[in-house]
Image (cartoon, rainbow, N blue to C red):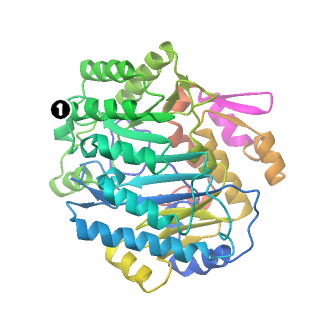
């Protein structure tokens, strides 16, 4: 994974292991067996539900999204989600288990109308319940919100709203293909505060096309003035299937995105400013106002191998030790579900050692990793298992060791994803990630 200065085309953000490119259609029987197996009920169960609709496609987006879809298409998709969850609930591994966390991702979940959201909640409630969940996160694009819709989010049990602000400069938002403009940000945020949620997160992206030092500083100050519970600062990357990446390849143009040293500097400046205002680092790109109250339950469980049901087109899940992904074309997805079949596209059963690697590298993204839970869970001391990469990265100033744990330095946190492949098994270090 390159740490060169330029932001070239490729996937830098590590969110799973083994790499997605190693998952296979012929391995899908593994996930069917896992779903049909009596579960370990001490393991938390959650659900990731993908809503693929957007008003327009951002130039840096690499997710499966569909733009400008009509009400009939949305209705048919909600029907399919209901059908998929109905099939899932009867599997032995899922039956009678309560959801402890739910994540509505996209796409743009808030593309759905208030009525469609109520229908979705009502339909799914026949199969699953998140009434007692510790967290229900819902991603929102500012321009899709209304006071009625925000009230509906509260009614259907959403506890954590993530608002995709990205930037406050209209010219930069337009240049990067965002659907919203800055007036919609404040209006949406005011509605969220008026209705009240336990947690409101806002996202910023360092290094968008057209970004400057002056504007980035202004964005950080504007975000701080809103006083959200959580702040997330991403560094812009260019996966293979973004509009920007395609334009670069087709026209042979230079990367229009800020280089990595500049993005890391901007992210570090934002962290410094937020910390000085009383926020606390929760991971390499997340800050919280109250480290006791403001927990990102979905992330904590994802990073620790909990069971996560994948629902919706192209959705990713992890269940009883098996990785899997749903079909990634909406027509295929809906055809399978309507036929009464789970729409699973590919899967992989990582070995115990690979699960150890997965949890270690994902928790490295939080900045501090304690070895004790790994010794208890895997019977292996990760500080010995990963002694070589830890020593290499300590020598390079990326982390330090003390009292049975490692702690990443600011230098390490700002480029943590580039460090993780050193912990991969040799066969996976040079393969394409996605």
What residue appears at the point 59 percent right and 72 percent down from the top-left corner?
Answer: 89
User: Which percent across, then down, holds residue 384?
Assistant: 79, 43
Label 1, residues with CA under 10 Å away: few <14, some 14-19, many ≥20 = some
Query: In the picture provided, is 162 more to the left or to the right than 424?
Result: left
Q: Considering only vertical position in the picture, is 49 above or below 58?
A: below
Residue 403 on the magenta segment:
yes
Please indicate, yes or no, whether residue 237 appears anywhere in the rendered image: no
User: Which percent across, then down, holds residue 141?
Assistant: 30, 44
Which corner quadrant holds the C terminus?
bottom left
User: Which percent across, then down, holds residue 195?
Assistant: 40, 35
Residue 265 on the magenta segment:
no
Q: Nearer the viewer, residue 143 or 27?
A: 143
Q: Which residue does the numbered mark 1 point to in the structure image?
A: 170
Provide the residue span drawn in magenta.
387-407
Query: In the picture provided, is 184 more to the left or to the right than 387?
Result: left
Q: How many marks?
A: 1
User: Which percent across, then down, holds residue 282?
Assistant: 57, 31
């Amino acid at each position: 994974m390159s740490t060169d200065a330029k932001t070239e085309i490729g996937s830098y953000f590590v969110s799973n292991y083994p790499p997605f490119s190693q998952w296979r259609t012929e391995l899908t029987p593994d996930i069917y067996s896992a779903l049909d197996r009596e579960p370990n009920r001490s393991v938390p169960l959650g659900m990731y539900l993908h809503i693929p609709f957007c008003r327009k496609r951002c130039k840096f987006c690499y997710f499966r999204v569909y733009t400008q879809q009509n009400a009939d298409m949305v209705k048919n998709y909600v029907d399919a989600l209901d059908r998929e969850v109905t099939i899932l609930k009867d599997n032995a591994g899922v039956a009678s288990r309560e959801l402890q966390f739910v994540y509505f991702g996209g796409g743009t979940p808030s593309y759905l109308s208030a009525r469609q959201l109520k229908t979705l909640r009502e339909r799914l409630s026949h199969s699953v319940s998140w009434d007692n969940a510790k967290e229900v996160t819902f991603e929102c694009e500012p321009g899709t919100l209304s006071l009625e819709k925000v009230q509906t989010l509260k009614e259907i049990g959403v506890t954590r709203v993530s608002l995709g602000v990205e930037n406050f400069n209209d010219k930069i938002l337009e240049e990067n293909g965002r659907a919203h403009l800055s007036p919609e940000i404040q209006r949406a945020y005011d509605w969220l505060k008026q209705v009240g949620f336990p947690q409101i997160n806002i996202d910023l992206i360092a290094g968008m096309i057209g970004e400057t030092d002056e504007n980035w500083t202004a964005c950080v100050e504007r975000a701080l003035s809103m006083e959200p519970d959580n702040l997330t600062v991403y560094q812009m990357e260019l996966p293979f299937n973004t509009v920007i990446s395609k334009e670069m390849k087709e026209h042979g143009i230079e990367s229009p995105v800020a280089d990595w040293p500049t993005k890391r500097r901007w992210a570090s400046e934002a962290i410094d400013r937020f910390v000085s205002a009383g926020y606390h680092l929760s991971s390499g790109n997340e800050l919280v106002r109250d480290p006791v109250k403001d927990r990102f339950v979905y992330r904590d469980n994802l990073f620790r191998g909990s069971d996560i049901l994948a629902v919706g087109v192209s959705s990713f899940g992890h269940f009883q030790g098996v990785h899997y992904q749903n079909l990634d074309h909406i027509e295929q997805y809906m055809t399978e579900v309507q036929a009464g079949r789970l729409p699973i596209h590919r899967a992989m059963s990582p070995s115990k050692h690979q699960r150890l690697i997965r949890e270690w590298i994902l928790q490295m993204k939080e900045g501090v990793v304690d070895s004790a839970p790994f010794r208890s869970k895997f019977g292996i001391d990760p500080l010995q298992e990963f002694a070589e990469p830890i020593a290499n990265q300590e020598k390079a100033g990326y982390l330090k060791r003390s009292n049975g744990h490692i702690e990443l330095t600011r230098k390490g946190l700002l480029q943590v994803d580039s460090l993780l492949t050193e912990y991969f098994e040799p066969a996976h270090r040079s393969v394409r990630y996605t």
